[in-house]
Image (cartoon, rainbow, N blue to C red):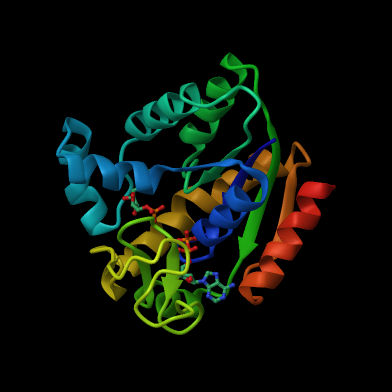
Amino acid sequence: MDIILLGPPGAGKGTQAQRLVEAHGMRQLSTGDMLRAAVKAGTAVGLQAKAVMDRGELVSDEIVSALIGEELDAMAAGQGAIFDGYPRTAAQAESLDAILSARGRSLNHVIELGVDEDALVERICGRFTCANCGKGYHDKFEQPKVAGTCDRCGSHEFKRRPDDNEETVRTRMAEYRAKTAPILPIYDARGIVSRVNGMADIDDVTAAIEQVIRG
Ligand code: ADP
Ligand code: AMP
């Protein structure tokens, strides 16, 4: 099963993708994570992407679609993919169709996480992740069970994203409204969109997504 988690920055896509990976052995394909890895590794793509990401603007369609194709090629044929933060433009949505069909795959669900924009700045500015395993947390909404220790791997090191500040978040939201929200009708026309209330508690959002997947 291949699904897209769609929603503005901070909607909870990464949080829910991590849960789907654990529950179903699916693979999370986050273009944001791939780009951050490229920046860290200092690759040509990373060097090109860094300034754009720091501003909260979108990296080129060609770069992100190439990254997605490479990741899909590294997956087992039967493993489901969760697209997190991709596609973000109409051109990317078109590329994804071509990328999937070339590999004999197709989209089963587009799950839109509906959120109140006022809540997103607080969510994003309080977000942090385990520096070792990448598990996501929040200062207020999802703290580690033992303060300072990752629930999943026991590491004591955490990190915050440089673009998780209020100014950049505003740009990222504007990009979402202008370029990403308009792709929903493409999937609506195919009858594969399910809307989930992303303002609910994290566990309740997970339960709603599970219901969509079970059909
Ligand atoms: P996205 O991947 O869509 O940008 P994240 O999954 O990283 O968003 O979520 C942003 C922050 O909000 C994280 O710190 C996460 O712990 C927290 N969060 C996610 N879902 C919820 C929710 N339903 N209620 C409250 N906080 C949430
Ligand atoms: P994210 O981790 O999804 O919040 O993405 C972080 C940043 O990476 C974004 O603000 C963009 O600069 C860039 N990015 C991630 N995914 C994409 C994409 N599909 N298209 C364009 N830019 C992207």
145 and 118: which is toward the camera: 145
126 and 175: which is toward the camera: 126
Percent position (x, y) of residue 98?
Answer: 55, 21
Percent position (x, y) of residue 78?
Answer: 66, 26
Total labels drawn = 0
- Residue for point 47% across, 69% down: 151
Percent position (x, y) of residue 7?
Answer: 55, 58
Q: Is residue 123 left or right of residue 108?
A: left
Q: Is residue 81 left or right of residue 123?
A: right
Percent position (x, y) of residue 57?
Answer: 30, 52
Q: Is residue 115 left or right of residue 123?
A: right
175 and 95: which is toward the camera: 95
**Quadrant of the snapshot with the N terminus:** top right
The extreme front residue here reads: 154
- Residue for point 57% across, 24% down: 76
- Residue for point 38% across, 31% down: 67
- Residue for point 40% across, 72% down: 124
The part of the image, by quadrant, that contains residue 49 is top left
Q: Is residue 26 above or below residue 5?
A: above
